Amino acid sequence: MHSTQLCDVLRNPPLWDYALALYQRPGVADACLQLQDTAGADICELLWRCWLDHHALVPTEKAHNALDEIRAWQTEVTQPIRHLRRMLKPRAQHEQDVATLRNHLKEAELLAERETLRQFQAISETSHAVRKRQTDDDSLTMQLARCLTIHEPAQEAALATLTTQYTAHHP
C-alpha cells in the first residue's frame, strides 16, 4: 500500500475520532486509567495500537523509533499538566478560583493528548512506520501488554476490558 492509499485508509476514522469512540465504551475509560495509574501505560498509545489493529496494521521498528519523541512529549508536557490537575482536585472542591484553574488544566491536558494522537496518526501515515498485520504477529492483547511496566491480575483484567470492548464493537 503506498502512502496516499494508507493516508486515505487511516483517515476513516481518524485516530482522534476513533479514540473518543472507543474510550466512551463501557469500562474502557476506567480500564485505561487503571493501566495508566498502576502499570505506567500511555492511554494514547493503547488507543493508537487498537486503531492500528482496527485497520489490520501493526507498527514497524521504524515506528518504534518515532515513539521516543511522542513519549518525550507525554513526559514533558501531558504528564506534568495531569499531575497539577490531579493535585488541585481537593482544593477545587472548596475554592472557585482553584476550580477554574483546574478546569483550564483539564482543557490543556486534553489538548496535549489530542496533540499526542495527532503525532501517532502522523507517524502511522508514513508507509515505513506501519505494515499489514500478518498471521504470525502478536495479538492485540500481547501488543498492549508490552506497553505496561507492571503485569498483575488487575492489569490483565483491565486489558481484557479494553480488548473485549474493542473486539465487540469496532468504532
Image (cartoon, helix red, strand yellow):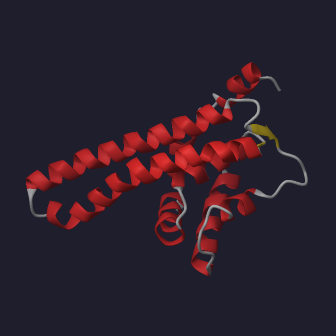
Q: Is residue 35 above or below residue 3?
A: below
Q: Nearer the viewer, residue 44 or 79?
A: 79
Q: Quadrant of residue 168?
A: bottom right
**Residue for point 73% across, 41% down:** 62
Quarter holding the C terminus is top right
Image-based side of 77 in relation to 120, left or right: left
**Residue for point 16% across, 54% down:** 99
Q: Is residue 116 above or below residue 154?
A: above
**Residue for point 46% across, 68% down:** 37
Q: How many marks?
A: 0
Q: Quick one: which residue is furthest to the top in this view?
A: 4
Q: Quick one: which residue is furthest to the right in this view?
A: 135
Mark yes or no: residue 99 visible: yes
> Where residue 153 sits in the image (x, y, percent)?
62, 80
Q: Quadrant of residue 163?
A: bottom right
> Where residue 167 sits in the image (x, y, percent)?
70, 54
**Residue for point 53% across, 35% down:** 118
> Where residue 31 sits in the image (x, y, percent)?
53, 64
Mark yes or no: residue 171 visible: no
> Where residue 134 sits in the image (x, y, percent)?
88, 47
Q: Quick one: which residue is furthest to the bottom in this view?
A: 153
Image-based side of 151 in relation to 61, left or right: left
Quarter holding the N terminus is top right
